[in-house]
């Protein structure tokens, strides 16, 4: 394998790793949505909301802090009022999430 090919493959591998560290891939059934992470981590990189109640989803600090509530509202899985109630319940100021 030539040096240029090795560099190319390493660049692809590093870009994929950076993507996995930077985004949550949230599955709404079979359809994925991306949610930017607030810091580089592998926590909840792949997450399915199928058959999970909103309360359990909102109880996950990493997802809640990264804006899962707004994504649930966009997808019609949660109302804006319900979002505000959960954010207040878990100690988040609703102003921070807009």
Image (cartoon, rainbow, N blue to C red):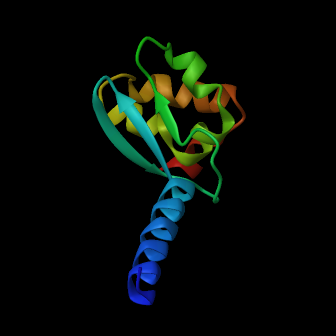
Residue 33 sits in quarter: top left
Left or right: 3, with 93 as reference point: left
Given the current orientation, which residue lies at the most extreme bottom position? Answer: 3
Q: Residue at x 28, y 27 (%)?
A: 30
Q: Nearer the viewer, residue 56 or 88?
A: 56
| Vertical position of residue 57 compared to residue 65: above or below | above
In front: 63, or 80?
A: 63
Residue at figure coordinates x 52%, y 69% from the top left? 14
Q: Is residue 22 left or right of residue 51?
A: right
Toward which corner of the image does residue 59 lie, by quadrant? top right
Pick the front one: 15 or 98: 15
Q: Is residue 71 above or below residue 79?
A: below
Asked if residue 87 lies left or right of residue 34, the reply is: right
- The number of discs equals 0
Q: Up-down: is 2 above or below 91?
A: below
Which of the 4 image quadrants contains residue 4? bottom left
Residue 98: give x, y in percent of width and height.
Answer: 47, 50
Tell me what residue is drawn at x 54 percent, y 43 percent.
45
Residue depicted at x 64% and y 42%: 43
x, y percent for residue 86: 59, 25
């Amino acid at each position: 394998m030539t040096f240029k090919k090795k560099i190319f493959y390493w660049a692809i591998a590093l870009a994929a790793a950076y993507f996995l560290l930077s985004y949550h891939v949230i599955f709404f059934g079979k359809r994925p949505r991306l949610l930017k992470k607030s810091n580089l981590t592998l926590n909840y990189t792949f997450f399915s909301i199928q058959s999970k109640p909103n309360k359990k989803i909102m109880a996950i600090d990493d997802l809640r802090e990264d804006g899962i509530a707004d994504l649930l509202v966009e997808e019609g899985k949660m109302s804006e009022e319900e979002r505000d109630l959960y954010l207040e319940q878990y100690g988040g100021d609703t102003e921070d999430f807009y």
